[in-house]
Image: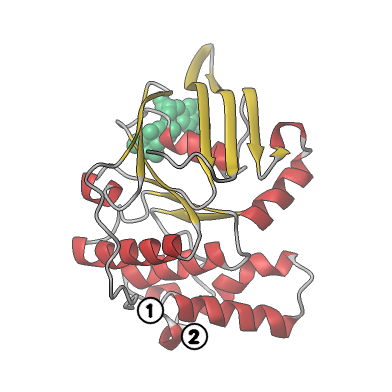
Amino acid sequence: MIRQTEKVIIDLDGVTRVYKVGIEQIRALDGIDLKIRENEYVAIMGPSGSGKSTLMNVLGCLDRATEGSYTLDAQDTTKLSDAALAHVRNERIGFVFQSFELLARLSALKNVEMPLIYSRASWWSRRKRAKTVLERVGLAGRIKHRPNQLSGGEKQRVAIARALVCNPSILLADEPTGNLDSKTSEGILRLFDQLHQEGQTIILVTHEGHVAAHAERTIRMKDGKIHSDMENPDRIPPAANGEAKP
Ligand SMILES: Nc1ncnc2c1ncn2[C@@H]1O[C@H](COP(=O)(O)OP(=O)(O)OP(=O)(O)O)[C@@H](O)[C@H]1O
Ligand SMILES: [Mg+2]
């Protein structure tokens, strides 16, 4: 059963997102009602074009609903100005993408430090925090490497560290293992398992059943709607010895 007693962190009510292309209108999201509680681990699945990334972009405050409301951490984001929404995104959201989206010219450390530049923290405390998070994802030995000097799994760990550096309320990951081989993917999924056990709320999009099996709950989308929403009966339990390996 989905845990009912904990704090609701995400509350979508009738969220619709319509894209206009020429005279055509595409209802990428069509009346989504969804509640997610603190420290849930949720997988979103569904066919290509069903609206998964559109939903993630709305959840991540990268995009807005055309209709409906989105309450994040008890704050109605629908009414916020663009600047206020960008602030919420920086403080509360960590986003991980399939293609890593790292800045090629910067070291791992500088990539991870980037989101902190908008905070008031001193240079020294920013650097310290970025180092701590890189250690957390198992990359203490790679902080000076630029993205092209890292493996795919290491690049994704840098992206995860960057997503975590501001202590986000939610970690959103859109096909985070989509560009990785299966062994590297498992390492990333073990890291997500550990972050979840430490209290992180995680929402992950995937096409693969074995990836979704790490989550507690799976939401299936179809044609911009939630087709099903249930607890994972065959969840892969988090590894007991679970040290994240670089
Ligand atoms: N910027 C856009 N402008 C117009 N239509 C868009 C835009 N982005 C997405 N769409 C359309 O919205 C629908 C949902 O797209 P979305 O990217 O959310 O699907 P998805 O479930 O993430 O698919 P995939 O599994 O292929 O990543 C699709 O029909 C897509 O063509
Ligand atoms: Mg997508």
Q: In the image, 161: left or right of 61?
A: left
At a point 71% along the width and 85% down the height, the residue shown is: 124
**Residue at the front extreme of this rendering:** 5
Cα–Cα span, label 2 and label 1 = 9 Å
- 62 relative to 189, above or below: above
At a point 29% along the width and 47% down the height, the residue shown is: 212
**Mark 1, secondary structure of its residue:** helix
**Residue at the bottom extreme of this rendering:** 141
Q: Looking at the picture, which amino acid does disc 2 mark?
A: Lys
Q: Looking at the picture, which amino acid does disc 1 mark?
A: Gln
Q: Contact, CB < 8 Å: mark 2 with mark 1?
A: no
The tag earlier along the polypeptide, 2 or 1, is: 2
Instruction: Give the residue pinned by disc 2.
Output: 144
The image quadrant that residue 7 belongs to is top right
Q: Could you tell me residue 93's position as x and y percent?
A: 59, 53
At a point 39% along the width and 74% down the height, the residue shown is: 148
Disc 1 residue lies near ligand 2 with CB under 8 A: no
- 196 relative to 132, above or below: above
Q: Could you tell me residue 119's position as x and y percent?
A: 75, 67
Q: Could you tell me residue 151's position as x and y percent?
A: 32, 73
**Mark 2, secondary structure of its residue:** loop
| Image quarter hosting the C terminus | bottom left
Q: In the image, 77: left or right of 51?
A: right
Whether residue 107 can be seen here: no
Instruction: Give the residue pinned by disc 1.
Output: 149
Q: Could you tell me residue 183's position as x and y percent?
A: 20, 66
Residue 212, disc? none
| Image quarter hosting the N terminus | top left
Whether residue 127 can be seen here: yes
